[in-house]
Amino acid sequence: MKIKHLVKDTNWKNRLENIGYGYHSDNDIPYWIEDYYFSISENFSEQIYQATQELWQMCLTAVEHVIENKKYHLFHIPNYIHHHIERSWNNETPSVYGRFDFAYDEIRKQLKLLEFNADTPTSLFECGVVQWYWKQHYFGDSKDQFNSVHEQLIHTWKEIKPYLKGEKLHFTCVRESLEDLTNVEYLRDCAIQAGIQTQLLYIDEIGWNGSNFVDINDQPITDIFKLYPWEWMTNEEYGHHIVNDILEAQWIEPSWKMILSNKAILPILWELFPNHPLLLETYFNDPRNLMNYVKKPLLSREGSNISIVNNNRTIEQTFGDYGEEGFIYQEFASLIKNNSGYTIIGSWIIGEEPCGISFRESDTLITNDRSRFIPHIIE
């Protein structure tokens, strides 16, 4: 695996905007990397595939363990939603996707799980569409990618369609984020291609008529895909309506994903699968015997409120509004290091099938909202 450079297309911004990618830069600082890429081997892509498949099964085991043993307190999940989680798990409410984030030790040739973005992962459009068109522009059909995101999304929506409770699947996100809207519209477009009738509405347009959720036309919501975190929903006033909904709207991602999207799952995985080669040693409350570790909030976004400690000395730290629920302490893992920055690997699982790779690069050891997306090629 190595970085390779190419001559940048001078029209690259217009080319990306023509496929609906409007957030390729932030104040003229590129988020999308156009002129270099990761060249990876077929064997490495297979290693990521196998790791993703194995971790998904481990995660399902961990969810079952948490539910059976009522360990919700470790996740700081509100009491009122526990039954809803159990019902969504027992009823096998459909789940579409998730993204595992890996560190890669280039010396030991070992992937290590950093976390699982199981509820509201973004960069799906970049992975499934933008980097594919990038490959076609520069290489045509002469090169390949680990990228069947688009096909797998359509296939997954086709599989979900018979299990929808109503005739229309609503899609929602916040109205202020172009990134969220682009990802939701991409997911919705794939659902339409799968033969599903859909409607977009923003999260603040979801209504409550006293017995069930309704859209802006006062039509009942029976099935809804949300790019909006469960932990936000359950701590907002209308979150309590979820358990009082007489139609029992089917939320995608389902509420059992609250368990996997919370970093409390990481010490649970370590407890269930101690010393597993894909896992990092991780604990609740304190680092125990770890000398080099990362302190992470149970719930946080975009790299906020994270501390990296080396030999009991904090060497890197971010701040923000997270951490009230508590922290986990995870063994420090070496990241891929190149002249341009530090890189983590994202591996997408859609419909329980590993199907795409994302590389995200940051100037610091902590991946944040300034990280860059790097495309890849299998060579």
Image: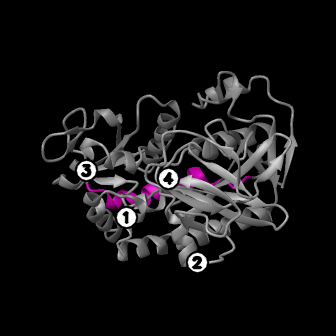
- Mark 1 lies on residue: 73
Q: Earlier in the sequence, mark 3 or mark 2?
A: 3
Q: Earlier in the sequence, mark 2 or mark 4?
A: 4
Examine the image and state in which quarter residue 305 appears: top right
Q: Earlier in the sequence, mark 4 or mark 1?
A: 1
6 sits left or right of 73 in the view:
right
Which amino acid does the dot numbered 4 rest on?
A: Ile
Camera-side residue: 71 or 144? 71
Which label was assigned to residue 273? 2
What's the residue at 43%, 57% (across, down)? Answer: 158
Camera-side residue: 301 or 129? 301
Mark in front: 3 vs 2? 2
Mark in front: 4 vs 1? 1
Kindly give the residue lying farthest to the front in the view shown.
312
Q: CA distance from mark 4 to mark 3?
A: 21 Å
Camera-side residue: 178 or 313? 313
Which amino acid does the dot numbered 3 rest on?
A: Thr
Which label was assigned to residue 322? none
Q: CA distance from mark 2 to mark 1?
A: 21 Å
Q: What x and y, as percent, mark residue 24?
A: 65, 30
How many dots with numbers? 4
- Mark 3 lies on residue: 222
Q: Earlier in the sequence, mark 1 or mark 3?
A: 1
Label 1 crowd (10 A; few <14 / some 14-19 / many >=20): few
Does residue 318 belong to the magenta stretch? Answer: no
Q: CA distance from mark 3 to mark 2?
A: 38 Å
Q: CA distance from mark 2 to mark 4?
A: 33 Å
Label 4 crowd (10 A; few <14 / some 14-19 / many >=20): many
Mark in front: 4 vs 3? 3
Q: CA distance from mark 4 to mark 1?
A: 37 Å
Range of magenta residues: 145-165
